Image: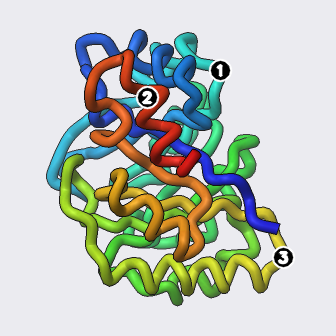
Amino acid sequence: MAKPVRIAPSILAADFARLGSEIAAVTKAGADMIHVDVMDGHFVPNITIGSDVVKALRAHSALPFDVHLMISPVDPYVPGFAEAGADIITVHPEAGPHLHRTVQLIRSLGKKAGVALNPGTPVEALDNIIGDIDLVLVMTVNPGFGGQAFIDSQLAKIAAVRKMIDATGRDIDLEVDGGVNMDTAARVIAAGADLLVAGTATFKGGENAYAANIARLRGS
């Protein structure tokens, strides 16, 4: 049975001067999770926030914090983000030498573990880890910046991951991040995604528009 489509607004597109109130606003507007993009200026060409900011934001929403670590090496920072209040921690296969060990570390801290696939990362990167994770994140843009154009070739990857997840019989979220808007949301849902990360599409129009934006992305 297919999961209901859920929306995880990316705070990368929020007003950084008002992050706490922005998170409270999208929570009230019906978001399902809060997506936190962590970038280090090394693994990806941008720098965003660290664990202290995640800790400060934790009090502003009871929703799960979906923390995407675009940092390398990633292992030394996992405990800090777990302690700061992350509920799901997602890492890239390229961000450390031992993906399975990283996943073990995340789960040993009582958190859900995700693996992110960049546009150039093959689905086969999941072959020996799919039984140990809770989420797969398919990147439909190259990571590093918000507001990029959706890469159409990734639709086939979403479908392939959906097939892989279904074959396990496990409850694994299939998340998509990058260029998700009112035009592309239906396509990624049709390909098999059940959790959509949307930054610009959620936060455009100001607080009074957030609820309608989220509902439209969900298709309701």
Q: Nearer the viewer, mark 2 or mark 3?
A: 3
Residue 154 point in image, percent of width and height: 37, 78
Comes first in the chain, label 2 or label 1: 2
Check disc 3 and give the amino acid type.
Answer: Gly
Q: CA distance from mark 1 to mark 3?
A: 29 Å
As drawn, is 140 to the left or to the right of 34?
Answer: left
Residue 96 point in image, percent of width and height: 43, 65
**Residue 36: quarter of image:** top left
Quarter occupied by the N terminus: bottom right
**Residue that mark 3 sits on:** 169
User: SS of the residue at dot 3?
Assistant: loop
Of residues 16 and 203, the one nearer the viewer is 203
Q: Nearer the viewer, mark 2 or mark 1?
A: 1
Residue at (70, 59) in percent of width and height: 134
**Residue that mark 2 sits on:** 51
Residue at (34, 67) in percent of width and height: 140
* Residue at far front of view: 220
Q: Is residue 75 above or below residue 118?
A: above
Of residues 79 and 145, the one nearer the viewer is 145
Residue at (37, 36) in percent of width and height: 202
Check disc 2 and give the amino acid type.
Answer: Ser
User: SS of the residue at dot 2?
Assistant: helix
Q: Is residue 156 above or below residue 99?
A: below
Quarter occupied by the C terminus: top right
**Residue that mark 1 sits on:** 62
Residue 22 point in image, percent of width and height: 39, 17
Pointer 2: residues within 10 angstroms few (<14), some, or many (20+)?
A: many
Q: CA distance from mark 2 to mark 1?
A: 17 Å
User: SS of the residue at dot 1?
Assistant: loop
Q: CA distance from mark 2 to mark 3?
A: 33 Å
**In this rendering, does residue 102 appear at all?**
no
Residue at (19, 56) in percent of width and height: 148
